[in-house]
Image: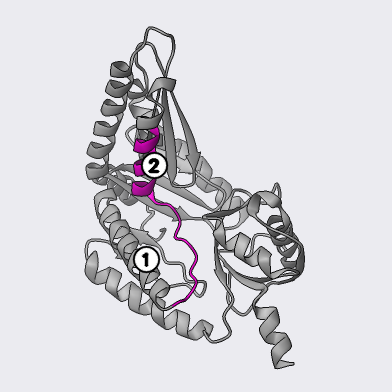
Amino acid sequence: MAMGQAARSTRTIVIAGVPAGLLQDDVMADILTIHFQMSRNNGGDVEEVTYPTRNKGVAYITFEDQEVVESVLKKEQHLLQDKRLPRSYPLTVTRYCDSVSPDSHHFVLEDLVEEMKKQSPDLNFGPLQPDGQIAVRGSFPALRVLREFLLLKAKSLSEEGKREGKSHQKPRKKLQEYRSAAETRNSRSEHREKQVLVLDTDIYLYMKCFLPKKFQANDVVISGVTDGDITTVCIESAGREAGAARRSRAKEIIERCSVELQKILRKERICLKEQSRGQKQRYKQLCERLKARYPGLLILPYDTHIDVVGTSADVFAQKKNNNLKGQK
């Protein structure tokens, strides 16, 4: 029996980030099965899905073939998408390991959170959730510093794991990695008359709303594709007459504006998970009133939360005046 369990564990992966509470458990298990059977997700035949588990937002997927596990782990990011879900949800996929308990994972995360608080004292950290998630609030510059710290931490842990002969999942591409790849594509595709750059999605949406002229230039076409918290902006020539200089100039203007906005913008999140449907509707109506009262704020309503993006003064003013102190 022990040998059978060991063999089974080699065909099993652990999924974190499953959106709990949105749908019935059997429906969510069905969505997970479909996701990990699809070829575009490097999946294969699923033998069993264990969901829910004692850890909120965590599921176990056992494949019929061990090779599928290796294939699934090679995919750098898994986005759970289904028409029954309100939006896409990023998943963290790791190899199953009997020797590591959920409690030990939690202790490690607690240590990491304490280290993060010391690293970024200007940020406000919420409580560590059972599924390993934590809410962090603060200015874009402070969040960017924290992101850099976590990237370095992940890199060092990955290199340490390789030295010890352990297998780890590749960390998700972050903004700086996207930018590096974008610069490489720019240098290789100059003859295709295209420039590419990567922005934080909140900053991109803020620019589109309040600074639309930054995305307008003579003889060039500027478009954006959003993937979660990252938006890829493509700058192409509108005609044969537009040269590399105009594309580079448009890219430089957008980048400079993005850097300046990172210094002054702040995001406040109002979570709606614990609200009734009627309360959610009232909050969305409130968003419309906020847009009229605070024309300098970007209001982004979602099914589970509302994001308010603007300068620190504007964000705090609307929060105080609309009695939203209790919301995060």
Side (left or right) of 282 relative to 184? right
Residue 29: quarter of image: bottom right
Tell me residue 42's x, y (percent). Answer: 65, 55
Q: Secondary structure at mark 2?
A: helix
Residue 117: quarter of image: bottom left
Tell me residue 214's x, y (percent). Answer: 32, 24
Is residue 167 a member of the stretch shown in magenta? yes
Tell me residue 88's x, y (percent). Answer: 58, 50
User: How is the structure coloured here?
Assistant: one colour
In the depicted structure, whether residue 16 falls above or below residue 284: below
Which amino acid type is shown beneath numbered disc 2? Ala
Q: Which residues are magenta?
A: 165-185
Residue 154 is tagged as 1
Mark 1 touches mark 2? (CB < 8 Å) = no
Residue at 70 percent across and 86 percent down: it is 5
Residue at 46 percent across and 80 percent down: it is 105
Q: Secondary structure at mark 1?
A: helix
> Circle 2 sits on which residue?
181
In the depicted structure, whether residue 111 falls above or below residue 287: below
State which quarter of the image contains the C terminus.
Answer: bottom left
Would you say residue 198 is visible in this rendering?
yes
Residue 295 vs residue 201, the one in the foreground = 201
Tell me residue 74's x, y (percent). Answer: 55, 59
Residue 265 vs residue 83, the one in the foreground = 83
Q: Earlier in the sequence, mark 1 or mark 2?
A: 1
In the depicted structure, whether residue 216 falls above or below residue 105: above
In the depicted structure, whether residue 287 falls above or below residue 213: below
Give the class, few, some or many, for how many residues have Cα within 10 Å of label 1's Cα (few <14, many ≥20). some
Residue 182 vs residue 116, the one in the foreground = 182
Residue at 50 percent across and 72 percent down: it is 167
Would you say residue 138 is visible in this rendering?
no
